[in-house]
Each structure stands twice: as C-alpha cells, then as structure tokens.
Image: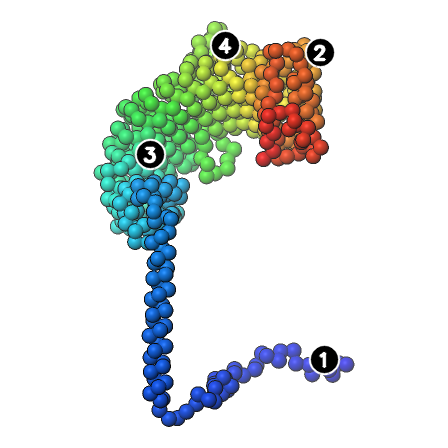
Amino acid sequence: MADRIVSWDWGPWDDAPPPSHTEEVQETTNPTLVDPRSIPLEVVEIDKRISELEEELSQLKIRRLEAFATRALITRIPPEILSRVFELVVHETLQALPTISLVSQYWRNLALETPTLWSYIKLDSDWNYPGAPGSEFTRKIKTFTTRSQACKILVDLDFRYCDSLGEARNILRELQPHLSRCFSFRVSVPDWEWMAAVKEACTEMRENLEEVSLRIDPADSEDLAPVTLLSGVYPRLKSIILEQTPLACVHAELPAVRRFYLVRDQRYHSGGRIRVSLKEFLTALTSAEMLEDVRVQSAAFYLDGTEPIFQRMPTLVAINRLTDLSISHVDSANVGNFLESISLPSVVRLAVQMDSNSDDNMQWLTRISRNCSTRMPSLRHLELRACSVNGAALVPFVSALHDLAQLTALALISPPSGQIGPRLFNLMAGGPTLTGGWILPNLQALCVQNCGDISGHELLRVVRARRGTSVPDVKDVRVLRVVPNTIEDDIIDVLRQNVDSLQTN
C-alpha cells in the first residue's frame, strides 16, 4: 500500500506539454476542403453573393432597429416634458447627467438646451478633484456656469477635497462672477482662514440666496475669532443650517427665514456639545419673524446671569410663528432652561431626543407641562425618543401627561431600557376610576417604536377602553403604529377592527 501512495502521480497536469496547434488543425480541418488548385469561378461568385447578402442583412437589421426606435413611445414625449424629467432625475442624483447625454444625440442636444441641468456645482469626492490650478473641477465650473446660462445655481463646496487654501481661492475666484445667481450655498471649511476666503467671494449673494448651510471643522471652531459670513439684508433667505458653526457667522436681517437648524458636525460621531449663548440663540430666533421650523442638536446653552429666566416673574421670549420644534442630544437641564424661556403660541409638534445613557432625563417635561396650556396652547404632537418613561420615571411622566390634555398624538421611541412596561398603558386604559381622570383624553394617534415588550394586548386595552366610554370629551384612538412589529398574530386582526389604521412598518 505504501508503494502505491509513493508512486501515485499527484499532479498529472502540472507539467503536461501545451497542445500542438498543428494537431488541432489536423483534427479540425475538413479533408473535402483541402485542394491545392485555384478556387473555381463559381465558388468565387457564390462567396461574393454571400458577402453581399450578409451586408444587406446587416443593413436590414439596422433599419429594423431604426424603425422600432422611431416608433418608440419615449420619442413621442414632448421635449419640454422630457426636459422636466431630466431635471427631476438630475436633482436626485448628479451622476445621472453624463448618462443622459450618452443615450442618444437627441437626448444630448436636449440636455445641452436645458440650462437647469447644469445649475448644480458640487465639489466632493465624485468630482475627482486633482488639486492643481486649471484642474478638472475648475474646467467643470466654466462648463456648468456657461451652460446654465442665467439660471439660479446651487453651489456645494466641501474644501476637504482641496489640498491648499490657494487652490480654494482659485475655485472661489472662478465662481465669484456667478454667485449673484446662487440660490443655495453650502460650504465646509477646515478653519476660519478658509471661511474668510469664502466671505471675500460671497459679497454678491444677497438678492437670490434662499438656502445656506455652513460647516467648520470642530477642531478650530471654538478657539479662534469667528468670521461673519452673512451680514446685511437677505430678503429671500428661507433656510439656515449651522453645522458645528457659531451663531456669529450669521449677523443679518432675515425677514423670510422659515427654517433654522443648529446641529453638530454630521461627519463625526462625538459626544461633544456646541456651546451656545442662550441669550444670543433666543435673539437669533426672534429676529426671524417668519420662523416655522427649528432644530437644536448637541447644544449646551451657557448663561451670563442676565437672562429673563432668572427674574422672579420671567418675561418670556415669544416665537409666534414656530410650528415645529426638534431638540436632540441636549441634557434635561438645558432643554428645561430653553423651553422655560420661550412662548410658542403656534407650535404643533415638539420632538425631543435625550441621551440614552441618562436616567433622569424627563425633568424638563415636568417643568414645562404645568403651564403648557398658556405657553404652547397649539401643541398637539409630542415625540419622545430615548426618554425614560418606566420605573421611577413613570410618576412624573404620567403627571406631565395629565397637564398635556390637548395632545392628539404621542410617540414613544427607543426607551433607554428597550421596554416601556405595561403600567403606563394600564393607567391610560384605567380612566377616572384608576387615575381620577382620563390621561390624554384627546389622544387619537399612538406610536410605539423599538420597544421589545409590546405584545399588542396593552394597546388593545387602551383602544377598547376609550372606544367603549360614553364621555364625549374622550376621543377614540384611530391610528396605531408599532415598529418593528412585535404584536402577536392573534391580536393584529382584533386591533385592525378597532382602529382606522394599524401600521407595522
């Protein structure tokens, strides 16, 4: 047996000689076609006829494709509608523009005749910026600004993809003559020196600017004196997003602003906070009389002792038109200080996301709920994310809900423990016999998300208890949303029979 193993050829193909081309020819050659004599004239004529027929067949196939192409339904779309389709596609993804131009000559001509397709100037990794004066990006700026004609343009510059401040200045110098027609301006810079270069080029944007988004790297955003990029009057500016950027960057009259976001740098997952003066922030909000939507993320408000909140009878700062307020990753004390300093007569939706690692994060709700009917009389939707509503936190939470009787929608999302527990729903279903009055009597929509202990039975008790009451002031729960779906299968059908809409995705 040992001799057989030793003598066995483990790699019979490793050193095998390559097959001979001559042998292949000999094996594949048809002997009937081997003839040393000249080809007969008849065969020559046949071969010629075959070539002519093959050429004619090829032309017929091309004509067939052209016939189908001319009758294609897409060719019957009027050019103005097709141009609009192109606009919608390019608005969603800029990478679609070269693809559109390669489909056909007609599509390319139409794309060249549609100026709005060339109104997006964006510096990011997709532009393959090589980092030299006269680079590909600079050439694209010239091409796009020429083809966009007199259209408004969107400018999005992420200077992380620029190697030096000199190169950034070349880009801004090329853009400067066209920034007067810029309606959306987004810029990200590494430090204030770069922001100063941006400011030099952006002196003519006031008339048409509608959206602005500013971002500066957090390493230098708080150590050096900030640069005021926007000053003067911006009559059409509707949206401001400050990403890791101090309020001092915007010192302008904003008669049309409707959206104001103060957020941390979205490129980095950091537990740091943006230090903001509460007085300056309130001043910025009240200066925008048309403000409707505010978001505050990862902010820490510092006080200088002169704020109205320290007075025995504080004077509230009224933000009259605000309808949507979102606060995320701001500690409970800062949330409470901010909300106790303002009056929001028109706010409809309040969304608050706390840090999940904080146990005592609902103090703010207890503070504002006592006089919410006068400070936020229009509040109807309350969304709580990563807020503690079970255990010891249940008592102040239920107490706050009693004071928020005007709410029509409540969302409980991602509690820190991953569970809500049955007690809250038992109290909501108990009615006056258990709590002395209905909790949230006007509730019509309830959302529970990322709560692993929801079986559906507790929701059914709440729905049935309210549906069966004869009290006219208690509304029926009409909409339920449970994501992900943890409801037991036998309860789903019963819930659908008792609510107008059950959403599980």
Q: Which residue is mark 4?
A: 374
Between tags 2 and 3, which lies in front? Answer: 2
Between tags 4 and 1, which lies in front? Answer: 4
In the image, 38 versus 248, the foreground residue is: 38
List the single residue furthest toward the left.
177
Identity of the residue drawn at 67% across and 14% down:
469
Closer to the N terminus: mark 4 or mark 2? 4
Q: Which quadrant of the structure image shows residue 288? A: top left
Amino acid beneath label 2: Thr
Left or right, 460 with reference to 68: right
Q: Which quadrant of the structure image shows residue 459? A: top right
Amino acid beneath label 4: Thr
- SS state under label 4: helix
CA–CA distance in space, label 4 to label 2:
28 Å
CA–CA distance in space, label 3 to label 1:
77 Å
CA–CA distance in space, label 3 to label 4:
38 Å
Q: Position of residue 139 (x, y in %)?
A: 27, 49
Q: Position of residue 342 (x, y in %)?
A: 46, 15
CA–CA distance in space, label 1 to label 2:
89 Å
Q: Position of residue 68 (x, y in %)?
A: 37, 56
Identity of the residue drawn at 50% across and 37% down:
269
Amino acid beneath label 1: Ile
Closer to the N terminus: mark 3 or mark 1? 1
Q: Which residue is mark 2?
A: 433
Q: Position of residue 476 (x, y in %)?
A: 61, 19
Q: Which residue is mark 1?
A: 5
Few, some or many residues within 10 Å of mark 3 (<14, 14–19, 20+): many
**Against 226, is 382 above or below?**
above
Closer to the N terminus: mark 1 or mark 2? 1
Identity of the residue drawn at 64% across and 13% down:
438
Are the residues tagged 3 and 4 within 8 Å (C-beta)?
Answer: no
Q: Which quadrant of the structure image shows residue 89? A: top left
